Image (tube, rainbow, N blue to C red):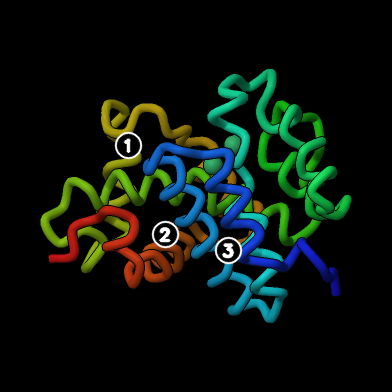
């Protein structure tokens, strides 16, 4: 089991707050953390490790806001802070352009949670009750509407579910249920 800073939630949050000022990006990172924790719990994996990887996967985006820089230019800072090779590898692998292929379950789940969390957040924002009562069917309908949350890569959402061996319906329902209890913190309507 990895120890030290990899699983230190307080340290991860402090690093995130040092690097990210925008509420929107902090919320995204928090949403991915929550989804990752939920999957780790379901799979009997290390919840603290998976949560911290989720929380920090985009930590350098404000300072490195291009695909050429993020997350590759952030990685040395994680190394300097003491994060392990496995931790940094997982962060790098969430970006296809980093050239680091996803291999571990942790890496596949990070990829799967990243884009879907963003899309569910967008879906929740336009519903009076937020994520409460949201169905996979309604989310898939929105996925087909190219103008809705146009910045979310639909292929990444679908491929993510496939990478973790789940149906898209299942994945949507699981992540929506994980995010629902933290709706207020994520700035979503709570009905
Ligand atoms: Fe990213
Ligand atoms: Fe992300």
Q: Which residue is mark 1?
A: 144
Secondary structure of the residue carrying tag 2 is: helix
Identity of the residue drawn at 59% across and 19% down:
66
Most extreme residue toward the right, as rendered? Answer: 85
Q: Nearer the viewer, mark 3 or mark 2?
A: 3
| Classed neighbour count for the residue bearing mark 3: other residues with Cα under 10 Å, few (<14), some (14–19), many (≥20) | many
Q: Which residue is mark 3?
A: 36
Secondary structure of the residue carrying tag 1 is: helix
Mark 1 → mark 2, Cα distance in angstroms: 15 Å
Secondary structure of the residue carrying tag 3 is: helix
| Image quadrant where one finds the C terminus | bottom left
**Count the marks: how many?**
3
Which label's residue is closer to the chain start, 3 or 2?
A: 3
Q: Which residue is mark 2?
A: 172
- Image-based side of 151 in relation to 41, left or right: left
Mark 3 → mark 2, Cα distance in angstroms: 13 Å
Q: Position of residue 19 (x, y in %)?
A: 58, 39
| Image quadrant where one finds the N terminus | bottom right
Q: Position of residue 120 (x, y in %)?
A: 35, 51
């Amino acid at each position: 089991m990895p120890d030290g800073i990899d699983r230190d939630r307080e340290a991860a949050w402090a690093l995130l707050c040092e690097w990210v000022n925008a509420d929107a990006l902090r919320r995204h990172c928090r949403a991915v953390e929550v989804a990752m924790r939920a999957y780790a719990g379901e799979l009997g994996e290390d919840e603290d490790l998976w949560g911290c990887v989720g929380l920090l996967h985009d930590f350098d985006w404000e300072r490195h806001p291009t695909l050429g820089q993020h997350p590759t230019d952030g990685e040395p800072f994680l190394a300097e802070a003491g994060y392990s090779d496995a931790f940094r590898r997982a962060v790098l692998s969430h970006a296809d352009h980093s050239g680091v292929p996803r291999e571990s379950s942790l890496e596949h789940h990070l990829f799967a949670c990243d884009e879907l969390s963003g899309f569910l957040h967008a879906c929740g924002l336009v519903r009076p009750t937020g994520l409460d009562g949201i169905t996979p069917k309604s989310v898939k309908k929105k996925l087909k509407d190219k103008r809705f949350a146009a910045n979310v890569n639909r292929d990444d959402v679908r491929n993510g579910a496939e990478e973790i061996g789940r149906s898209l319906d299942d994945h949507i329902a699981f992540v929506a249920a994980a995010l629902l209890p933290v709706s207020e913190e994520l700035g979503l309507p709570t009905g």
